[in-house]
Amino acid sequence: MSMKETLHQQVIERQQELVQLVSGLLRIPSENPDGEQLTVIRFVEDYLKASGISYERVAVNPDHPCVLAKMGSDEGFSIILNGHVDVVPAGNRSGWKFDPFCGDVVDGKIRGRGASDMKAGVAGLLFTMRLLQQSGAKLGGNIRLHIVSDEETTGIYGTSWLCANGYADGGDACLVAEPTSFDNIEIGQKGICHLKLIARGIPAHGSIGNYVGDNAIIKLAKVLIHIDDLTKVPGHFEASQAKALENSLYIAKQALGERGQNAIDHLTANVGLISGGTKINMVPDYCEAVVDMRLPIGIKKEEIQAAVEELIAKSGVEGVEAELAFKAEANHTDYDAAIVKAVHGHAEKIWNATVRPAYQWASSDAKYYRELGIPTIQFGPANLAGIHGYNEDVDVEDVVHSAEIYMLTFCDLLGIE
Ligand SMILES: [Zn+2]
C-alpha cells in the first residue's frame, strides 16, 4: 500500500481516537464571551506535545492565546490550517435536551456546544497532523497550524492579529475548518460596510408634537421604509467566477428560497440598530440608525454611495446624513486553486455526491488570509441547525469523512504518494 493509502486507512481505523478528541474538546466549556480559554488552549498544547509536534503559544491578550504548530521542512509548499476553540455561550439551559458540555455520542452524533462550530473541525486538523507525524512520511513542504481562541467576539486577538503580524506570510494555501456541511466548499465571501443614517429635527413639547417642532424619528422612518431598495444593487463577476456563482445561487435557493438567491450577488441591508428621542413628552430632535450592508463581489464604493443617496432622495426628507464605514472587502479564492481542486475531488469521491465550491453570504476569518493573497477555503463538518442555537451536534460520519478528506488533500499538496 502507498503511504497516501496507508494514511487514509489510518484515519478510518483510528476514528475512535478522533471521536474521543472531539468529546474531550467539547467537555471544556470555552464560552466566549463570559468563559475562559486557557483550559482548552492547554488541552490543544498537550495533544500536540503527545503527538511529538512542536508548538508555541503567542498571546497579544493572555486571556485569548493562540497556539501555533509546525511540521515539515522550511522549503516547499506551505499549508496553513486554522480553527478556533472558543464557542458561543450555551445560553438558556432549558433550551437544551442535553448538557451542552457533555460531549457524549448518541445515535451517531457527538453532542455539545461547539460540536459543529467548530471543535469537530479543530479535532480533524489535530488528528490528521498527529497521524502524519507518527507515520514518518516525508513532507514536500510544511503544515502550519493556527489555533485561535477569540473568533466568536471581535477576533482581534486571533486570526486578524496573526495575519497582521507575519505569522501567515509565505502560505501557499489555507484551510479553515469552519462548518460548511459536506456538500459545499466556501471559496468566497461578501464584504461588509456599516451605514449610519442620521436625521435631525426641532424639539418641542410632546403634547402638541403634531403641530409644532420637527420629529427626527418620523423623518428617519420615512427613509428606512425604502431600505429594501438597496438590495437592487448588483455585484460584478468575472467569467472565471461563473461556475462558483452558479453553485452559490443554487445553494442560496435551497436555503433561502427563490428570492433569497439575491443575497449572493446583490447588496443586502439590515437595519440592525436604531436610537432616537430623549423623553416621551418631547419631540425628538435626533435619530440615528445603523445598517449592516453586505457587499457582493465586484461592487464599487461609488455604486453603494449612489444607491444610498437615491434612497434618501426617494424619501423626500431633506438633510438626512449618511456615513459609510467600510469594514471588509468581498474576497474569493480561484475555483482552480490547488486546495479547492484537491478538497473538491476527494469530497465528491468519499461522499459519492455533488460537492459545490461556492461563495457565502456571511463573513469569517478566511478573509484575513485572502487579504494576504493566500488561496483559502473553508470546509468543515457540521449540522448547521444547532450552530449558535440549542442542541448543537455533529455526525460522526461527517467528522471522519472530513478528516479523510483533509488527509488526502495534505498528501496531494505535500507530494505524499
Ligand atoms: Zn466558527
Image (cartoon, rainbow, N blue to C red):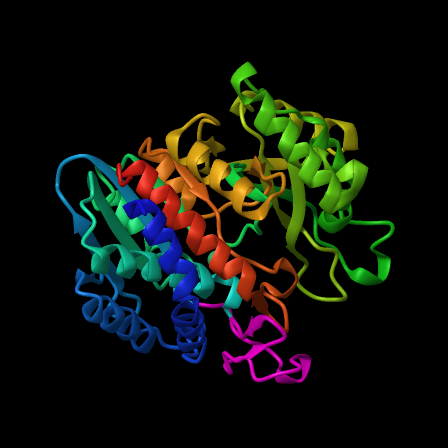
Q: Residue furthest front?
A: 1
Q: Nearer the viewer, residue 402 or 236?
A: 402
The residue at the point 73 percent across, 50 percent down is: 217
User: Residue 72 colored magenta?
Assistant: no
Res 319 seen here: no
Please provide percent x and percent y for residue 350: 53, 47
Give the vertical position of 81 relative to 117 (above or below).
Answer: above
Examine the rendered structure and indicate whether residue 235 appears above or below residue 348: above
Q: Which of 120 and 133 is in front in this view?
A: 133
Residue at 56%, 65% in the rendered image: 394
Residue 409 located left or right of residue 255: left
Considering the image in quadrants, where does the C terminus appear?
top left
Q: How far from the left and from the top, in percent, is residue 97? A: 66, 82
Secondary structure predominantly adopted by residues drawn in magenta: loop
* Image quadrant in which you'd find residue 184: top right
**Residue found farthest to the top:** 239
Q: Which residue lies furthest to the left in this view?
A: 74
Residue in the image at 36% along x and 57% along y: 125
Residue 156, how many percent across, how many down? Answer: 34, 54
- In terms of depth relative to the viewer, which is nearer, 3 or 330? 3
Q: Which image quarter: residue 311? A: top right
Residue 179 place in picture, x, y as percent: 52, 54
Q: Quadrant of residue 305?
A: top right
Q: Is residue 38 above or below residue 410?
A: below
Residue 300 seen anywhere in this rendered image of the structure: yes
The residue range painted magenta reads 87-113
Left or right of 218 in this view: 343: left
Whether residue 110 appears in magenta in the rendering, the answer is yes
How many numbered tags mark residues here? 0
Residue name at image x 46 percent, y 63 percent: 120
